[in-house]
Image (cartoon, grey):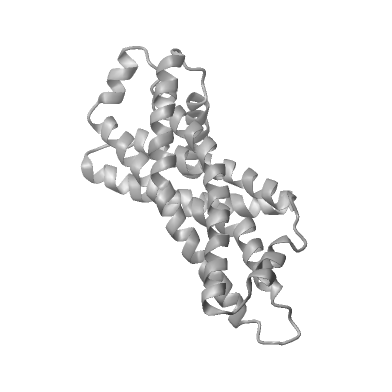
Amino acid sequence: MNFLHRLGAYLLFLRKAFAKPVKRRVYVEGLMAELEKLGFNSIVLVVIISFFIGAVLTLQTAYNMSSPLLPRYLIGYLTRETLLLEFSSTIVSLILAGKIGSNIASEIGTMKITEQIEALEVMGVNSVSYLVGPKILAALIMNPVLYVFSVFIGILGGLFSGLVSRVVNFEDFIYGLHFAFNPYYVTYSIIKTLFFAVIFTSIPAFYGYNVQGGALEVSKSSTKSVVDSSIAILTMNLVLTQILL
């Protein structure tokens, strides 16, 4: 019953977050600020992780293809498929859930215990829409962009490591990238990133908004929000894969 009660409260929270803003100018200003905080400030992290994961995927694939019957272009093919289908959508979202989610839970939790949210409510402001709405919308805009960016950087990392280690030549790797390409996989992964964006912004915001106590409770809610966001992302990944594929 506790889970159902929390789920119901979370759904009502989402409804308030997507409510029509009273002042569009203020909402747009908040959106611009969140685009920088949630999106542009995460680019360096995504670049570093994607490059090295792409490099490792290429090396591991090459070292496990010991049979001479297996063509070398499969290295590029398997690197592309892994990045497209899982890493750049699911794993990057899990990483962002830790980075962005903890920040959101701490920020809103601090506002809650210092009674800033109550002050907004007294002034007649829909505090959920004002504080959470721009964060969710910014993540919906930036997460697909970060996904595409991650795939591109991951492929570059794979190509670089393959050429430097001489496990694959340039022509074979590029041919593997084009081999049996299914454009629907990109659509499938972008759909996943949209669901994940809502999850890793709204769940931490929900925990922060409902925190009670002091700084210690804010810290605990931040940790719990990251854990629950990660579980929700993995569960949603399973559900969407079953439905879309």
Residue 234 at least partly seen: no
User: Observer-nearest residue: 241 or 45?
Assistant: 45
Q: Position of residue 59 (x, y in %)?
A: 55, 76
Residue at x-position 44% and y-position 41%: 39
**Residue 138 visible, this angle:** yes
Query: In the rendered picture of this protein, how many numbered marks are placed on residues?
Result: 0
Residue drawn at point x = 59 percent, y = 79 percent = 167
Q: Position of residue 197 (x, y in %)?
A: 52, 42
Q: Which residue is rendered at x = 72% and y = 87% of the image?
A: 68
Is residue 10 or residue 143 the one in the foreground? 143
- Residue 240: where, in percent of width, then height? 66, 49
Q: Quadrant of residue 115?
A: top left
Give the side of residue 33 with respect to residue 142, left or right: left
In the rendered view, would you say 26 is above or below 60? above
| On screen, residue 103 above or below 131 | below
Q: Quadrant of residue 33?
A: top left
Residue 212 position (above or below residue 149): above
Name the side, left or right, on which 33 lies relative to 58: left
Q: Residue drawn at (47%, 44%), measured in percent from left and top?
A: 200
- Percent of width and height locating residue 144: 57, 43
Of 77 and 168, the residue lying toward us: 168
